[in-house]
Image: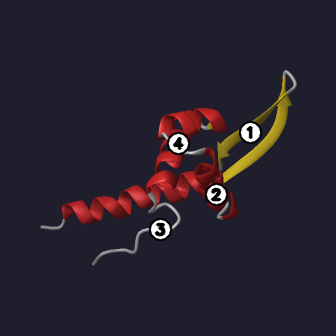
Amino acid sequence: MFKELDPILHSQLRLAAMSLLISVKEAEFTYIREKTNSTAGNLSVQLNKLKDAGYIEITKQFKDNYPQTLCKITPKGIDAFEQYVKDLQQYLKVG
């Protein structure tokens, strides 16, 4: 009856990051850190887990001589997020 929720997305910080990226498609690391009220270290670990799953792409570059890390949601990430939402809705319908 209940589908197993995606363990990659079933983490508060990873889900928050994916929710942000779903709406903006691409964001700087600092933007995600501020919006999620996360530490840089924890966010970095969680974003790498999303990257390893193929849900986001991480690009490191320089902008005005400062390092810049961009995170972009992938088509696989969009599909996974949409499926996660559908699966979660099934939990809410029971009763």
Residue beneath the point at 48% across and 69% down: 7
Distance Cα–Cα, label 4 vs label 1: 17 Å
Tell me: 41 left or right of 81.
right
Left/right placement of residue 62 relative to residue 90 reads right
Q: Residues within 10 Å of mark 1 (few under 14, many from 20)?
A: some
Give the residue pinned by disc 3. 6
Where residue 20 sits: x, y (%)? 51, 39
For disc 3, the neighbor class at 10 Å (few under 14, some 14 to 19, many from 20) is some
Image height check: is 88 above or below 37? below
Looking at the rendered image, the quarter that the C terminus falls into is: bottom left
Q: Give the residue number, with chain letter if any, for mark 2.
A: 45
Which color scheme does this rendered protein use?
A: secondary structure
The tag on residue 22 is 4
Q: CA distance from mark 4 to mark 2?
A: 19 Å
- Going 62% across and 45% down the picture, which residue do you hit? 40
Q: Residue at x 53, y 65 (%)?
A: 8
Task: Please report whichever mark, 4 or 2, sits nearer to the chain's N-terminal start.
Answer: 4
Left or right: 68 with respect to 88?
right
Q: Amino acid at mark 3?
A: Asp
Label located before the other in sequence (4 or 3) = 3
Q: Which residue is mark 1?
A: 69
Using the rendered image of the protein, determine whether residue 27 is visible from the camera's viewpoint: no
94 and 53: which one is in front? Answer: 53
Residue furthest bottom as drawn: 1
The residue type indicated by label 1 comes to: Thr
